[in-house]
Image (cartoon, grey):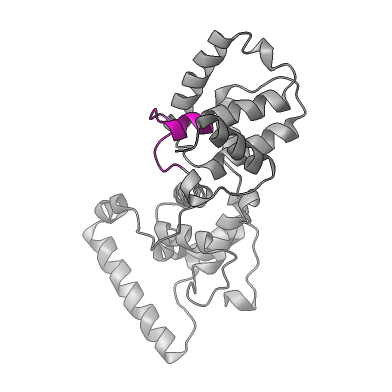
Amino acid sequence: MKPIRNVVAMTGTRLAAGQALPAEQVSTRPLGEVDEQTAAVVDMVFLQLQAIFPAWRQAWPDDKALALAKRSWTKGLQASGIRTIEQVRFGIEQCRRSGSAFAPSIGQFVAWCLPTAGMLGLPEEEAAWREAVQGCASPDSWRWSHEAVRQAAAAVGFWELRQGAGGADVLRRRFGNAYAQLLGRLARGETLGTPMQALEWDGARTAAERAERAGEQALQERLRQQGLAEAGHGARAALLAKLGIKRGNHDA
């Protein structure tokens, strides 16, 4: 096993260069578990913070304070789900861009470790929501800007979006929650699997609502097979109008 000092040095060098670590250097264990790999990652973070912030000693004036901070940060990172070197890299990059002389708190660093949609190459949440409302009429043919947008819309339910089931505010909140979860998975380097619709909504529907949904789906399938336009645009049209979206040819 390589000495921990060497591991820290190599990790810090790669992070500073914006490079991903080899698989064998990326721990899959939570940062709160005390092992040599975890210690190397946390030590590396603090080495980077000390290099970036000239006034870091105001936060950690001596070795005892530094050791206590490392334990606190380890727990904070674990509790926030910051478990990969790629997530930590987002935080370090934000530290460099902050322009401050003072090291951030663990809360601020955690926030910086969570990349925005734009940083991941995805539309921001509001733009994604508008796309979901537009694309729900023909999800199979709609040109989705990213798979995460489609999956977030699918998690809410294309039928629910078309019907405006539960109201625009409820649908918007559910979409935001689903989208945030998908962004978190991408930030952790995970792949996007097949989305599952929220279970509580199946249970919350009345028998009449479930029957209406099944009937509407069957009708839309027949209409698609016959090449006819989709019926039942009323509630979705209201959503589009609320968002100020004009229906174009792609939205017919």
Which residue sits at x=53%, y=62%? 133
In this view, the residue farthest toward the right is 99
What secondary structure prevails in the magenta region?
Answer: loop
Q: Which image quadrant is residue 30 in?
A: top left
Side (left or right) of 194 relative to 53: left
Q: Observer-nearest residue: 60 or 76?
A: 60
Query: Which quadrant holds the C terminus?
Result: bottom right
Q: Residue at x 65, y 30 (%)?
A: 48
Estimate the x, y position of residue 155 in percent, counting from the top left.
40, 58
Q: Quadrant of the N terminus?
A: top left
| Residue 176: x %, y % from top left | 50, 48
Q: Is residue 175 left or right of residue 204?
A: right
Q: Is residue 86 inside the magenta stretch? A: no
77 is higher (above) or lower (below) than 11: above
Residue 169 in view, yes or no: no
| Image: 236 above or below 87 | below
Q: Nearer the viewer, residue 4 or 116?
A: 4
- The magenta segment is 27-41
Dividing the picture into quadrants, the one containing residue 197 is: bottom left
Coordinates of residue 140 in the picture (x, y in percent): 47, 75
Q: Is residue 121 left or right of residue 55?
A: left
Examine the rendered structure and indicate whether residue 41 appears above or below residue 211: above
Depth order, front residue of 199/8 = 8
Residue, far bottom: 226
Q: Residue furthest left?
A: 207
Please name whichever residue, 4 or 190, is drawn nearer the observer in this view of the structure.
Answer: 4
> Which residue is drawn at the image coordinates 46% and 54% (left, top)?
190
Q: Residue 129's quadrant in the figure?
A: bottom right
